[in-house]
Image: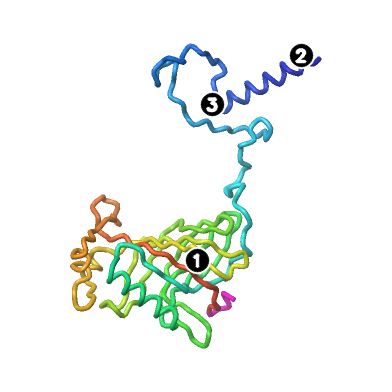
Amino acid sequence: MALTRCLFLAAALLSTLSGCGVDETYTGMGVSALPGQPLNPIEEDVSCNCPDPVLCPEADAVGDAPKDAGPWPEDLTGVAWRFDSLVLTAPLSGTLGEGLNDYFAKEISEGRLHILLAVEKDDRDAGTLSASVGAGKLVEEVYSFDGEPSDLLCLLTGTSFETESPAFLAFPNAQVDPPELPIEALELSGTVSLDGKTVTGGKLVGALPVEDAQEMKILGQSFFDLLAALGVTPDVSLDGEGAPDAFRFEGDWTAASVTMAGGGGS
């Protein structure tokens, strides 16, 4: 009886390994063969696709969310955040970079610069956040977008989110002429607190088109020429044709929840 049970378990294990892409006709004759030869094939990643949690304990349950995603925040539908810090880390550096970041810090802290991120729909089944991002304004402690915002679709995993579909954002900036810094292909990521009140560890990635840089002036000088003088060259292809036609911008940010016109926020 014990022998029969062992044979049954051995057959089941061989069947499972075969289903995971492991060859049951193993032989030790290939130990000295060169990689890639028939007796010593190059190893490939083994992906187990069996549903048995005992024979394949590493198999994930069906679904998009990872098993170790951790706790999830409260429903974020209607929640809105305002950037309470923004530090650009590339491509500007030195005095110019410090000056621009000092400007952002002062304008944000003194309530003159408002960058808003508002969630219209939190779809937990799809693991997505449908949101809008754009410059804002404040009237009697209630925020609203100043102009037309850009749609932003994000993936949500636990408390972490990242952009699925890029957006556009024009940072109001009185230091440049015209008075805004237009960023295309905008991607945002960050960590939301469990109560939805704050976003920390935010990352921003986007691109400033060459055409916009050529038209912009800062301190009376072409922004494009200023970047060139600093050794900064276009390094992003927005049109997908390979030739760089934009400057990559990166930054760090945090945000806090605010009340938006229409009942959103807190």
Please name the amino acid that badge 2 sits on. Answer: Leu
**Residue at the farthest top position:** 29
Mark nearest the camera among 3 and 2 is 2
Q: In this view, does 162 lie to the left or right of 59?
A: left
**Residue at the farthest bottom position:** 140
Judging from the image, what secondary structure is the residue with disc 3 in?
Answer: loop
Within 10 Å of the Cα at label 3, are there few (<14), some (14-19), or many (20+) other Cα atoms?
some
109 w.r.t. 13: above or below:
below
User: Relative to the observer, which residue lies in front, 177 or 175?
Assistant: 175
Q: In this view, does 55 lie to the left or right of 190?
A: right
Please name the amino acid that badge 3 sits on. Answer: Gly
Range drawn in magenta: 261-266
Mark 2 and mark 1 residues within 8 Å of each other at the beta carbon: no
Q: Earlier in the sequence, mark 2 or mark 1?
A: 2
Please state the horizontal and vertical placement of residue 138, each as a whole percent of the image. Answer: 47, 83
Task: Give the label on residue 21, or none.
Answer: 3
User: Relative to the observer, which residue lies in front, 53 or 93?
Assistant: 93
Task: Give the label on residue 153, or none.
Answer: none
Q: Distance between the residues labelled 2 and 1?
A: 62 Å
Q: Write the residue at 45% across / 69% down.
A: 133
Q: Write the residue at 43% across / 78% down.
A: 108
Q: Distance between the residues labelled 1 and 3?
A: 42 Å
